[in-house]
Amino acid sequence: MDDLFDCIVGAQLDSVTFVQDYVQLHFDGPRLDAYTWPAVEIGDVCYRWGEQDYRNQLCERIASIVARASVIEGEVIRVEFSDGAVITISLRAEDYCCAEAAMFSVNDGTSRWNVW
């Protein structure tokens, strides 16, 4: 599954789009839709949806380069940036806000995608 994310390693997070009740993370083409609100980890501090400065910290990742991206099925999607910040999306059933937690899509002519 991790090879699905290979296409964003070395890419930058080029935009963050808030869409009513979810967020889209765009990586120079590929897109990660988070229906379960992602957390932003910077050092020992974790910012979560609804907390002060959450949106700012998420948007401050724009232009950051992805160092690693992975998924642990049933646990978490992790996007690690070269500056040490990490965006995580929980895949634990108890954290789901709707039928899906996230969807990753690549539109490079192959139309690859995955839903968790």
Image (cartoon, rainbow, N blue to C red):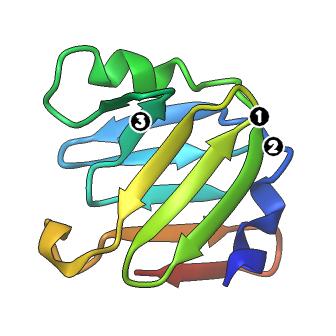
Question: Residue flagged by tag 3: what amino acid is it?
Answer: Val
| Residue 52 location (% of width, % of height) | 19, 16
| Residue 4 location (% of width, % of height) | 72, 76
Helix, strand, or loop for circle 1? Answer: loop
Question: Residue flagged by tag 2: what amino acid is it?
Answer: Ala
Compute the Cα span from label 1 to label 2: 6 Å
Helix, strand, or loop for circle 3? Answer: strand
Q: Are marks 1 and 2 in contact (CB under 8 Å)?
A: yes
Q: Earlier in the sequence, mark 1 or mark 3?
A: 3
Q: Is residue 30 left or right of residue 22?
A: right
Residue carrying label 1: 65
Judged from this view, the residue extending furthest toward the front is: 44
Q: Is residue 15 left or right of residue 69?
A: left
Question: Residue flagged by tag 1: what amino acid is it?
Answer: Ile
Residue carrying label 2: 11
Compute the Cα span from label 3 to label 2: 18 Å
Residue 76 versus residue 20: which sits nearer the camera? 76
